Amino acid sequence: MNALLESHRSGWPALSVPLGERAQSIRELARNFALTNIAPIADRIDLEGRFPDDLWPRLGDAGLLGITVQPAFGGLGLGYLEHLVAMEEISRVSAAVGLSYLVHSHACANQIQVHGTEEQRRRFLPGLVRGLQIGGLAITEPEAGSDALTLRTRAERTSTGYRLNGRKTWIANAPVAHVMVAYATTEPDAVSSSGITSFILERTFAGYRPTAARETLGMRGCQVGDIVLENCEVEESSRLAGHNDGKRVLVSGLALERLVASGGPLGVLQACIDVAVPHCRNRRQFGQPIGSFQLVQSKLADMLTSLNAARAYAYAVGAATARDHAHRFDSTGLLLFVGDRVFQMAAETVQLFGAGGYEGQSIAGRFLRDAKFFSIGFGTSEIRRMIIGREMMRESGGDIPSSD
Ligand SMILES: Cc1cc2nc3c(=O)[nH]c(=O)nc-3n(C[C@H](O)[C@H](O)[C@H](O)COP(=O)(O)OP(=O)(O)OC[C@H]3O[C@@H](n4cnc5c(N)ncnc54)[C@H](O)[C@@H]3O)c2cc1C
């Protein structure tokens, strides 16, 4: 067994927060799955920039792709806290696999479960849950990044449904996905983004064309590409929720997505500690382990306290969400906090490895490249701060204009 696998396996015991039996058993399931099926190939996934095809059905067989999906459609029928814990353990071993996993199991499958008709659930969920079909979520466009509700992709009414034209960009899983939850403008002149509609698009549709995967700095095993829609005709039955109901679907989905997504940076933070502690014990300079120097110990202390604070925050938001007590900006605040901390701590991990951390394919370098994503994806750190600050002002009675 290589040293990396060993440090992942032994790990560092983080703050133990009692989350209940169900979350604990999902943690064990996801951790054992990740150690057996992902850890031995995590470096290769990063180097080749490719998610292994056979990992999807194996994730499905383990029950990890349908954590929040109802048992009637093959899922486990559990909650978002359990999903967050699974995301954490998968990302601890490979953040890129975690990102592909998240958009498939949450942004696509969970959105279909929550907003789909019975017929749509029956049609799409069993294949997604078993890993026989791959899912994704397409919001971003070349001109609509942070300004995510100003979409240029048009969906015009036809006699049987809609005709879509436009381009989605930077879409995780796009080069390989079979099913894509996508948003388009149905009323370009509507005020306050009320003219957006969501759809379930299928790879086999005429006029649906995914591009090749982009080269990315990090998250390299998660294939990211564009989707070109050229006179893509869809039936009424491909619409997810009501006509012009897309903003509600999108905004409610993003709040939950940020909660489950926070398992990504949590997992990477834990992984930083998993590899940094044995390195500081084993690497000797000036005749002693570098872990005996106080400046080194201070980095380890910052890493551990960041992880513990982030975990406590994440599980508190997860529990509040389960009780329906979460404020709508809680998950945004959580992702803001843990997304910023993981990048700082991954940079400290590179520092602790010295030149070895700066080597092209070093594990610490992978953590740093992957960690940067968490301040860009799911809304950038700036946008998260903007959302929270704006909501605080609104709730205090401030006359704040809507930025929809
Ligand atoms: C690996 C990866 C995977 C992704 N996967 C998906 C996916 O599956 N589906 C999907 O729909 N999208 C996906 N995205 C896209 C992602 O959601 C966007 O990149 C993100 O929302 C930011 O948009 P942008 O890149 O266009 O940046 P821009 O919006 O161009 O922002 C550039 C900079 O300007 C700042 N900025 C913009 N507006 C403001 C403002 N009002 N105030 C202050 N600062 C501002 C931003 O914070 C940022 O620093 C993915 C991106 C990456 C990198």
Image (tube, rainbow, N blue to C red):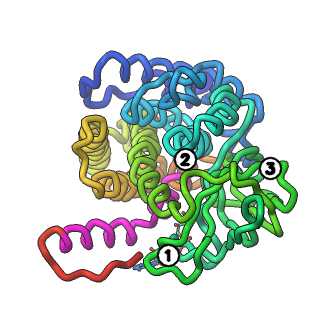
Which residue is label 1 attached to?
Answer: 147
Residues at marks 1 and 2, CA–CA distance in whole angstroms: 19 Å
Which residue is label 3 attached to?
Answer: 203
**Location of residue 35 with respect to 275 vertically, above or below:** above
Q: Nearer the viewer, residue 394 or 318?
A: 394
| Circle on res. 373 | none
Residue 290 shown in magenta: no
Q: Which amino acid, by three-letter code, is at mark 1? A: Asp
- For residue 325, what is the image quadrant? top left
3 or 2: tag closer to the N-terminus: 2
> Could you tell me if the residues under marks 1 and 3 are in contact, i.e. CB atoms within 8 Å?
no
In terms of secondary structure, where does tag 2 sit?
A: helix
Which residue is located at x 43 percent, y 42 percent?
260
* Image position, residue 149 (x, y; %): 51, 72
Does residue 369 appear to the left or right of 338 in the view shown?
right
Which residue is located at x 75 percent, y 36 percent?
52
In terms of secondary structure, where does tag 3 sit?
A: loop
- Residue furthest left as drawn: 396
Classify mark 1: residues with Cα within 10 Å, few (<14), some (14-19) or many (20+): some
Does residue 392 appear to the left or right of 373 in the view shown?
left
Q: Which amino acid, by three-letter code, is at mark 3? A: Arg
Q: Which amino acid, by three-letter code, is at mark 2? A: Ala
Mark 2 Cβ inside 8 Å of ligand 1: yes
> Could you tell me if the residues under marks 3 and 2 are in contact, i.e. CB atoms within 8 Å?
no
State which region is magenta: 370-394
